[in-house]
Amino acid sequence: MATATTTPATAAPASPQRPTGAPTGSLWGAVLASETTKLRTVRSTVWTLFVTAILTVGIGSLITLARVSRWNDLSIHEKLTFDPTSFSLRGVFLAQLAIGVLGVLIVSSEYTSGMIRTTFAAVPQRRVVLYSKAIVFAVVAYIATAIACLAAFLVSQAIFAGTLLPTGAHVGQSLTSPGALRSVLLAAFYLTVVGIMGLSLGSLMRRTAGAIATLFGIVFVLPLLTTALPSPWDTNVGKYLPSGAGVATFTTKPGGIGAAHMSDVLHPGAGFLVLVGYAAFALLVAGFVLTRRDT
């Protein structure tokens, strides 16, 4: 009698799951941890933040010393409209280039070394990588620049000790003075936004020199070009540039930055919103372009 033989059924091969591309919490956590490690292990991070702090404190102190040395030569109007808070933070104008360079290097250095290919191979969600870099950079940059701005403020106000206004009041301010703490915190925020713009330019241009040159043009050259515009276009345009909005955030008196009227500068709250808009726009454009071209 013939016996029927049965062959065991083979299981159908499991179809590979297609990636959805939607980042999960664990993915964000892993990428954030990776970018944190990259940032703190790169030597340029420490040196660039150190230069930023030196420029913020050093330049602010030197300018304060120069103003104190010729205080008696100022007119009564200049003394009464003098803004010691924003004056102590003028080192920010030069420090913004240093923090901007760091933002550029965070992205452009990976393109230069070719490590960006490894990064995107491990994390195909490119926007997650870019925005994780921005988050880690923003936290580190803000903490470092806030400390530097606070030190610049305290040192400069100590230099102003003994200098008197025509009213008999002391020129020096404290953190409890109106607008002082806000100025210190938002000056650091402005530096962080400049760094975010540098990071975005580094992602868009992929070349360190080109990105730094473009950032230099935005924060230094554009404000100079607006001064050539006829009035009132010079002030109406200039106050909405990143530098103009940044100045507005840490100014407590219009005379502190050479402005004759309050209408020449934005309200600090408006300046803050303009800076947020610049940072968000730069990151959105960088993220959009990043996902639509090859590595």
Image (cartoon, helix red, strand yellow):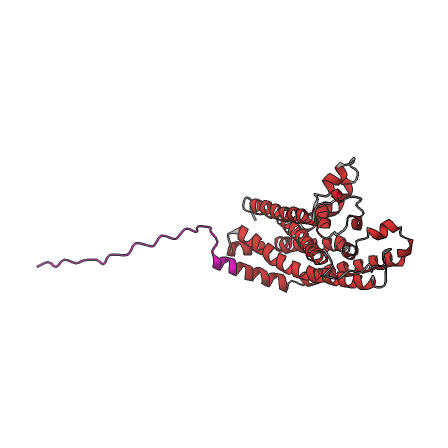
User: Is residue 183 positioned above or below 155 on the image?
Assistant: above
Name the side, left or right, on which 122 lies relative to 12.
right
Q: Residue 118: x percent and y percent? A: 55, 56
Is 56 contained in the magenta span? Answer: no
Q: Residue furthest top?
A: 230
Q: Residue 227: x percent and y percent? A: 79, 40
Closer to the camera, 165 or 78? 165
Closer to the camera, 58 or 203? 58
Is 22 contained in the magenta span? Answer: yes
Q: Residue furthest front?
A: 167
Name the side, left or right, on which 107 lies relative to 177.
left
Q: Which residues are magenta?
A: 1-29
Magenta segment, prevailing SS (helix, strand or loop): loop
Tell me the residue at 79%/49% (across/down): 257
Name the side, left or right, on which 39 lies relative to 160.
left
Q: Residue 209: x percent and y percent? A: 70, 50
Picture quarter with the N terminus: bottom left
Quadrant of the image occupied by residue 158: bottom right
Name the side, left or right, on which 270 lies relative to 132.
right
Q: Is residue 78 visible?
A: yes
Q: Residue furthest right?
A: 73
Closer to the camera, 236 or 226? 236
Quadrant of the image occupied by residue 150: bottom right
Tell me the residue at 69%/52% (across/down): 190
Q: Residue 165: x percent and y percent? A: 85, 57
User: Is residue 157 positioned above or below 17 on the image?
Assistant: below
